[in-house]
Image: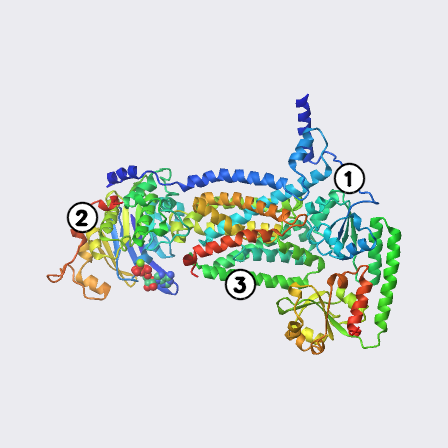
Amino acid sequence: MLLAKNLMVTLGASQILHDVSITAAPGEFTCIVGPNGSGKTTTLKALTGDVRYDGHITINNNDLAYLKPWELATIRGVLPQTSVLAFPFTVIEVVRIGLMTGADAQDGCLALQSLARVGLAHYADRFYQELSGGEQQRVQLARVLAQIPHAVGEDGPRWLFLDEPVSSLDIAHQLQIMSLAEQFARDGGGVIAVMHDLNLTAMFADQIILMANGRILQAGPPSVVLTDANLSQAYGCDVKVGMPPPAGIPYVLPHAARHTGLVATKS
Amino acid sequence: MMFARQRKSLLCLFAMCLGLLPVKTVSAETTDSKIMSLGISVTETVYALNQQHRLVGRDTSSTYPPDVLEVKDVGYIRALAPEGVLSVAPDLIIAEEGAGPRETLDILKDASVEYVEVPNEPTASGIVEQILIVGRALGVEGDAQALADDVAARLADAIAAADAQPQNRKRVLFVLSTRGGKITAGGAGTSADGIIAMAGGVNAIGDVEGWKQLADEAVAVAAPDVILMMDRGGDHGIDNEGLFNMPSIMTTPAAQSKSVIRMNPQLLLGFGPRTPDAVEKLSEALYDPAS
Amino acid sequence: MASDAVVHLADLGRPKDRLQFALKMHVYLCILLICVSLASLTVGATGITPWDMAAALLRGEAPEQMASIVLFDIRLPRLFMGIVVGAALAVSGAVMQGLFRNPLADPGIVGVSAGAGLGAILAIVLGGLLPVWLAEATGMYLVPFAAFVGGWGTTILLYAVSTRGGQTSVATMLLAGIALGALAGAVGGLLAYAADDRQLRELTLWGLGSLAGASWTKVTVTVPFILLALGVAMTLGRGLNGLALGEATAAHIGIRVQRMKNTAILTVAAATGAAVAATGGIGFIGIVVPHLLRLATGPDHRALLLNSALLGASILLIADMISRVIIAPAEMPIGIVTAFLGSPVFLWILLRNRGAVGF
Ligand SMILES: Nc1ncnc2c1ncn2[C@@H]1O[C@H](COP(=O)(O)OP(=O)(O)O)[C@@H](O)[C@H]1O
Ligand SMILES: [Mg+2]
């Protein structure tokens, strides 16, 4: 279980998070949504211990404040919204950096398997800096998966914290990555993802946390959170849920697409 | 048999590594020993005493007389490399005060190379002492005494002649370098101060101690009548126009009268057997520029 | 989907393993260092060689005093000094580049050497003012220790100025390096006024940068400092790899980032400080060696650090050999040789990285 109680975060001079409380269960896919600047990333950073916070966070019943970095590294992986890389590492080397401290570091194939899970095994020897933004993000996800390869460990569930994991991906890869995360949850792990795309969120989330202005507006299953009233208030514009566009205008929903596995094999 | 001998040699090597084994030493003979001369004054004295056939090495600054250029140069006098010095195999090193570094000198001592340090005071008695010490080190005391007497006499004459000139004493500023638009000049206690005094001049910055970079205003206040410089190239080789247009110099009497004297630095500052000539030359340049 | 992956993995074959190659490189570079060391013991103005001496010994002759002095009191301490200083400079460069996440960071270029130099100058000039008991207690360790403190202060200042939220601004770093270098130069110039003639001579000499003054005394002062720093540096490989992904990610994969950074800074300061105090300013080793190795074997710091130490030692020994034979029996200051070898490589790195560096 992941519990956060009354989180307050102040960055610079201004208070960014006000009294944020979150409960996320293992086995569930939790999505945080909200307009730009509403504090989604900041919330995730508090949950991963990147920023100083007031309040209380426990992960698998351990107080986050007392967990050592290497202990945390074995129970949760973090995919940041943007990643940087100094020096010309190859793709496989980047994934192995994530593997260095993981419990399964001995497994020689793990890095390549993780790459295969995000559909990039054939890029193993390319230089990371030569990939497109979306490909880089998938490599970073592979790095996280190599660090946390199993959804449940001996001492409890494992956690994935993903900040906009699919924002820069095409629709096929969006589905692929979301399915991966969903599978992690089905296997008993916990997933907390900051999301941009409300349709994808509605499709995959077990719990949605809707944020605005550094506060939680509403948390619960998609049908409860994704309402006209909630979304209009959060995003500051008139939003209608479940309205197809006028006849004649094409629209594409992820629900109608099916992940075929083709993307993983293209070379 | 063979095996035993080899083992003994290996033991020998081991002992030597530990510094346990006494090693053969080479002792310097005084009469015909090979010498290395470090410093302008020492080298010129060696030539003046006609002992140049014994020279096997010199430092970079020793360039007079021109013949000496044939002798191997072991580098800058203050940064001698021990193996370079040992490679020319001197029995005796005669060095001006200040040669180094200490680490090199320590090793030379260990190598039983005889080392004589010669003080180099920029005074008449300093020159005499220097000649006598070099002479003793070379084993030619008699010649050295004669040379010292001769140099002392000529120097006394030159100084007396300079003193006797009827004009007012000129204020002289010795400029070592104008690098970066900043004047570095010789104050009290420097060799430049010594030669200026001998030649009947007044050091324009006699109240400053040692070699100093001067503030522009300090140069103006010093009000030199003449600028004295070295005649070699490099950054010392600023031309007259450039010199007199330097803001610090522009206001001085020297700039108004366009008075600059350039002299060979070895001759001027060497303080060896040629110093009487230097005094004559400088004094002449100061007070009798026409001749 | 998992079954998909397995099929394709078999098709793809094993990816290249640059780390394995880099680890093999340890062996090659060790062999190189041994060869260069032997050459360094053999080459010199006197033409004395260890082989002649060994042959003489095998014949049962007592060794010449001259030969034993040249080999054991001149070349051997110089060899040790060259190895540790070369290793220190190259490893400081590699650690600094990992810490600043930039291939241009180098103690010489960003002013750490200047700071260390300033510490050394202060110790040389003002050392005489210390109370007697303190002077006796510190003894010959005073200068390297002061250089260490100077380098340490500069590195911390530099890091504080040029790094925000785990990201280093290269422009700020280089500019801060220029400023710190100028400051150190200015204070050094100021001290030159206070120095007496002997101290001034020591300062000039020391500024030239040379291994010529390597004596057993200096070796015993310098080697422990540097070996300690290098030993600690070798543990930084994993941490620096993580740092390549940014401070936040480094923490996420289990690295104690702040502690690692502090260790890296202390290591650089100790290694650079001791090297600078012992041999003066020797440039470019710290930037050229890690760069060449990254090209050859990849940027993985777990192998890069030891490889840098080995190659740095070899290259400094080679530069030293050049410096002592090229105008023998005189010697060229070694800083000139390394600058000749290094500055083209530096420019080449700048050219290749023009986009990344932001010029
Ligand atoms: N380091 C920082 N210092 C000050 N304010 C920040 C900092 N990082 C983010 N903020 C502010 O905090 C708010 C929330 O940011 P963030 O959590 O990144 O939003 P998002 O929901 O888009 O991920 C924004 O208004 C942003 O400007
Ligand atoms: Mg965000």
Residue B106 location (% of width, % of height): 72, 46
Q: Which secondary structure lies at badge 3?
A: helix
Label 1: few (<14), some (14–19) or many (≥20) C-alpha neighbours in 10 Å: few
Q: Quadrant of residue A119?
A: top left
Vertically, is A183 above or below A134?
above
Compared across the picture, whether B201 is left or right of C340 comes to right
Q: Residue C179 carries which label?
A: 3
Q: Distance between the residues labelled 2 and 3?
A: 60 Å
Residue A16 in sight in this render:
no
Q: Which secondary structure lies at badge 2?
A: loop
Is the CB atom of the residue marked by disc 3 within 8 angstroms of ligand 1's nearest atom? no
Vertically, is B240 above or below C156?
below
In the rendered image, the residue lying farthest to the left is A247
Q: Which residue is drawn at 11% across and 62% down?
A: A246
Q: Nearer the viewer, mark 1 or mark 3?
A: 1
Q: Which secondary structure lies at badge 1?
A: loop
Q: What residue type is disc 2 on?
A: Arg
Residue B277 location (% of width, % of height): 81, 64
Q: What residue type is disc 3 on?
A: Ala
Q: Are marks 1 and 3 in contact (CB under 8 Å)?
A: no
Is the CB atom of the residue marked by disc 2 within 8 angstroms of ligand 2's nearest atom? no
Q: Residue B9 carries which label?
A: none
Where ligand 2 lies, by quadrant? bottom left
Identify which residue, C112 or A42, lies in the foreground: C112
Residue A158 location (% of width, % of height): 31, 44
In the picture of the structure, the residue carrying the numbered disc 2 is A258
Same-subunit check for callouts 1 and 2 = no
Is the CB atom of the residue marked by disc 1 within 8 angstroms of ligand 1's nearest atom? no
Mark 3 belongs to chain: C
